């Protein structure tokens, strides 16, 4: 059986124009990998929204990170001041990964 290790999976739902700001925080806490996933539509307390291909006004993106607990904690601390002002949705969960030394 392949050995796995526990790491943190962080998902950050953000307005697409803010992705570079989020990835700069990711790099600053020494996390070397992330994925950017574009989101077409969704809903929340403020109602439903849908990506507008013409203006991109409501474009949302998920930035996905898998990291050690220590690096994940540093990233969350760095992003905490932005949560309210940029209406970020940040979720954290534990995952099992193969080749844990990469995270």
Image (cartoon, rainbow, N blue to C red):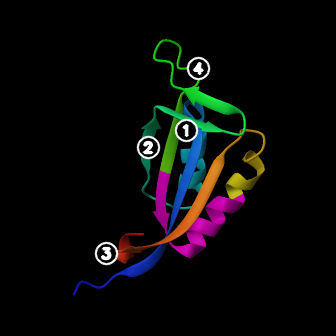
Point out the tag, 3 or 4, that comes first from the N-terminus.
Answer: 4
Observer-nearest residue: 92 or 44?
A: 44
Identify the secondary structure beneath mark 1.
helix
Give the alpha-carbon distance from disc 3 to disc 2, as whole Å: 21 Å
Q: Which of marks 3 and 1 is nearer the N terminus?
A: 1
Left or right: residue 36 versus residue 81 is: left
Above or below: residue 2 compared with residue 66: below
Give the crowd class for mark 2: few <14, some 14-19, many >=20 residues within 10 Å. some
Q: Among all residues in the image, which is located at the extreme left?
A: 1
Q: Earlier in the sequence, mark 1 or mark 4?
A: 1
Residue 99 is marked as: 3
Picture quadrant where residue 29 is located: bottom right
Of residues 58 and 49, the one drawn nearer to the viewer in this rendering:
49
Rendered location of residue 103, percent (x, y): 42, 69
* Residue 1 occupies quadrant: bottom left
Dot 3 and dot 1 residues touching (CB under 8 Å): no
The answer to whether mark 2 and mark 1 are in CB contact below 8 A is: yes
Mark 1 lies on residue: 19
Q: For the residues marked 3 and 1, what is the alpha-carbon distance in whole angstroms?
A: 27 Å
Reading the image, the residue beneath label 2 is 36
Q: Which residue, given by chain and number where applicable, does mark 4 sit on?
A: 57
What residue lies at 31% left-to-right and 75% top-to-bottom? 99
Q: Which of marks 3 and 4 is in front?
A: 4
Question: What kind of element bears circle 3?
Answer: loop
Q: Give the range drawn in magenta.
A: 64-77
Q: Nearer the viewer, mark 1 or mark 4?
A: 4
Marks 1/4: CA–CA distance: 14 Å
Q: In this view, does 81 lie to the left or right of 55?
A: right
């Amino acid at each position: 059986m392949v050995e796995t290790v526990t790491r943190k999976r962080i998902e950050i739902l953000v307005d697409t124009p803010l992705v570079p700001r989020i990835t700069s925080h990711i790099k600053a806490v020494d996390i070397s990998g992330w994925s950017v996933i574009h989101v077409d539509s969704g809903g929340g307390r403020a109602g439903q929204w849908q990506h507008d291909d013409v203006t991109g006004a409501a474009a949302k993106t998920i930035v996905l990170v898998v990291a050690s607990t220590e690096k994940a904690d540093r990233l969350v601390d760095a992003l905490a001041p932005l949560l309210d002002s940029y209406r970020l949705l940040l979720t954290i969960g534990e995952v099992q990964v193969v080749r844990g030394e990469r995270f």
